Image (tube, rainbow, N blue to C red):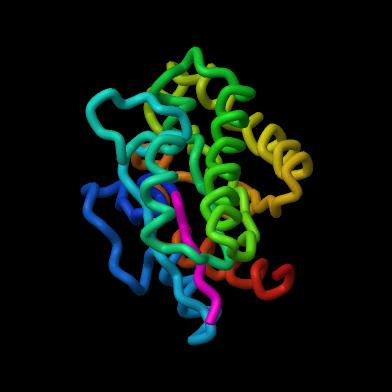
Amino acid sequence: MKKILCYGDSNTWGCSPRDSSRYDENTRWPMVMQSKLGSNYTVIEEGLNGRTVLNLSPVNSEANGIEWISVLINNYIPVDIAIISLGLNDVFIAEDTSLQEISDGVEQIIDAIRYSHASAGLLIPQIIIMAPPEYNTEVEGSVFYELQINKLKALPETLKSLSVKQNTIFFNSSDYVKGSSIDGSHLEAGSHILLGTKIAEFISDRI
């Protein structure tokens, strides 16, 4: 049985843009992926509202992607596949953060996952870098976030380049889904189901 770790933010957790509640297991993209892949896979959901790549929270270590992965990964090793789905919050929380800083942070997360396995004499997992979904500019007031929205649009290419450098697998969620017209960034239920279906197909074809 293959074990898949999904390490991400509120969209991995399953936050609804309508009331901030959590979608059920039939809706959240990691669980939809689990259903599509079947019983030969076990999916671990490790999403957290507000989680960033970089260590931007002085009060919540779990929200700091780089810091927390070294703690969390030891609870689950060995894993066969690790999906890293972060970056959106870095763009919006710290607007002066560069794309290169985000990329460098994702690289540190990759290194931590690999080191946790290598140091224990375990096989290194396949790593999928999942770029965040496109921001929905139908949201009222989105014009005030032009800088962040443009940066988010450019992030997939930056992460794709990192993926080549690190010999990982790249998946661009923006090819299939975008944030809700309610808040711009969180996925509607239908988008979760579509994303889970597409990433399951991707894994079946590629890994």
Q: Position of residue 101 (x, y in %)?
A: 58, 23
**Is residue 138 at least partly visible in the picture?**
no
38 relative to 46 in the view: left or right: right
Q: Position of residue 41 (x, y in %)?
A: 51, 78
Q: Is residue 99 magenta?
A: no
- What is the residue that sits farthest to the bottom in this orientation? 39
61 relative to 78 in the view: left or right: left
Q: Is residue 172 above or below residue 107?
A: below
Q: Position of residue 175 (x, y in %)?
A: 65, 51
Q: Main secondary structure of the magenta part?
A: strand
Q: Position of residue 5 (x, y in %)?
A: 47, 61
- What is the residue that sits farthest to the top in this orientation? 96
In which quarter of the view is residue 59 placed? top left
Q: Which residues are magenta?
A: 1-7
Q: Is residue 158 above or below residue 189?
A: above
Camera-nearest residue between 115 and 141: 115
Q: Is residue 183 above or below residue 19?
A: above
What residue sits 72% from the left and 43% below the top? 166
Quadrant of the frame with the C terminus: bottom right
**Is residue 109 at least partly visible in the picture?**
yes
What residue sits 70% from the left and 51% below the top? 168
12 relative to 20 in the view: left or right: right
What residue sits 65% from the left and 53% below the top? 171
Camera-nearest residue between 158 and 28: 158
What residue sits 43% from the left and 25% below the top? 92
